[in-house]
Image (tube, rainbow, N blue to C red):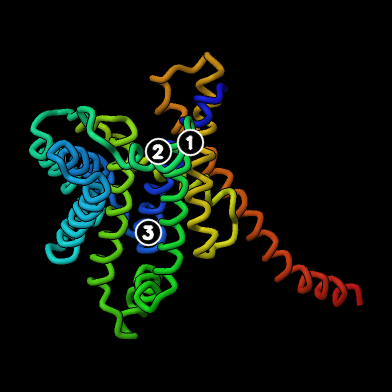
Amino acid sequence: MSLFAFAGALETGFLFSLVALGVYLSFRVLAFPDLTVDGSFPLGAAVAVAAIVKGVDPFVATAGAAAAGAFAGSVTAFLSVRLRIMNLLAGILTMVALFSINLRIMGRPNLPLQGNDSVFDRFGRLGDFGLWNNVILLGLVAVGAKLLVDWFLRTEIGLALRASGENPAMAEAQGVNNSAMVYLGIAISNALVALAGALFAQAQGVADVSMGVGTIVTGLAALIIGEALFRRKTVFLGTLGCIAGGLAYRLFVAATLSLGFIQAQDLNLVTAVIVAAAVVMSQSQRLGIAKGLLSRLFSPRIGDRANAASE
């Protein structure tokens, strides 16, 4: 693997660690299977690039993209909470609607930056980072997002969000508004995904309406790989696993592609194999833990029964 490919893998890994953080909030914290991310990722790209082309500051445009993602998540939450539509279907409906909305925002299927400054150009003026300019900035953003998520999930509202996802009935008995928690959690989740889309488009220099295809699969791959790497179920390790999983996934893909016998069109196949392997690894770890617990619980009893029988 060349140094350029290695830097590109790190760059994309940090980008999709933001997606994994969003998926972590929806799938793991809220237990809400949200497919909106396949639409909110290109939504963030479309809003950011369209705003930058019109002369908006790239940092303001990126923040606006994250806000647009939060709004998209709120629409999914509205469909689920108020209209009583199944969670999975609510995400699919929003994702399908966002395809047309993204076309409206850009005015065409793809929209280049057309030589306008991006956040990476502004950051590069702070120092001569060369090949590592995008990697450093995205690494700082990913780590910063991880620390913010850690802090938020330890606040009173964050604890209520976790309780609502873990046991809605018990949380409601303690005075937690489960509907409000769904709105908040899905909005933050899609804001992170839209932020990733905005940064991805600025790194590539173009926003495309189809760039969100498979985003949910990539986010889940990073999340599951991270969970396989870190067994303990704490918030800190859970969010750290999102970053580690995103990096490990992209480095593995880059290494696989560099071998030559796998081409770029085989990327979806490679992703499916990686996710399946990570799931099997995670299940085997859980099975080993369960066997250990059972042996500790029942082996003394079995020994006592054997001694009683011998007497």
**Distance from label 1 to label 3 (Cα)?**
33 Å
Label 1 near label 2: C-beta < 8 Å? yes
> Badge 2: few (under 14), some or many (20 or more) residues near its Cα, within 10 Å?
some
Res 311 label: none
- Residue at the disc numbered 3: 25
> Closer to us: mark 1 or mark 3?
1
The residue lying toward the viewer, choosing from 209 and 5, is 5
The residue lying toward the viewer, choosing from 167 and 28, is 28
The quarter of the picture where residue 27 lies is: bottom left
Question: Looking at the picture, which amino acid does disc 3 mark?
Answer: Leu
> Badge 3: few (under 14), some or many (20 or more) residues near its Cα, within 10 Å?
many
Classify the position of the N terminus by image quarter: top right
**Distance from label 2 to label 1 (Cα)?**
7 Å
- Give the left or right position of residue 302, taking residue 80 as reference: right
Q: How many marks?
A: 3
- Residue at the disc numbered 2: 124
Q: What residue sits 53% from the left and 14% below the top?
A: 260
Q: What residue sits 28% from the left and 70% below the top?
A: 181
Q: Position of residue 29 (x, y in %)?
A: 40, 63
> Is residue 28 among what the camera can see?
yes
- Give the left or right position of residue 13, taking residue 259 as reference: left
> Closer to us: mark 2 or mark 3?
2
**Distance from label 2 to label 3 (Cα)?**
32 Å
- Residue at the disc numbered 1: 129
Callout 2 secondary element: helix
> Badge 1: few (under 14), some or many (20 or more) residues near its Cα, within 10 Å?
few
Question: Looking at the picture, which amino acid does disc 1 mark?
Answer: Phe
The quarter of the picture where residue 15 lies is: top left
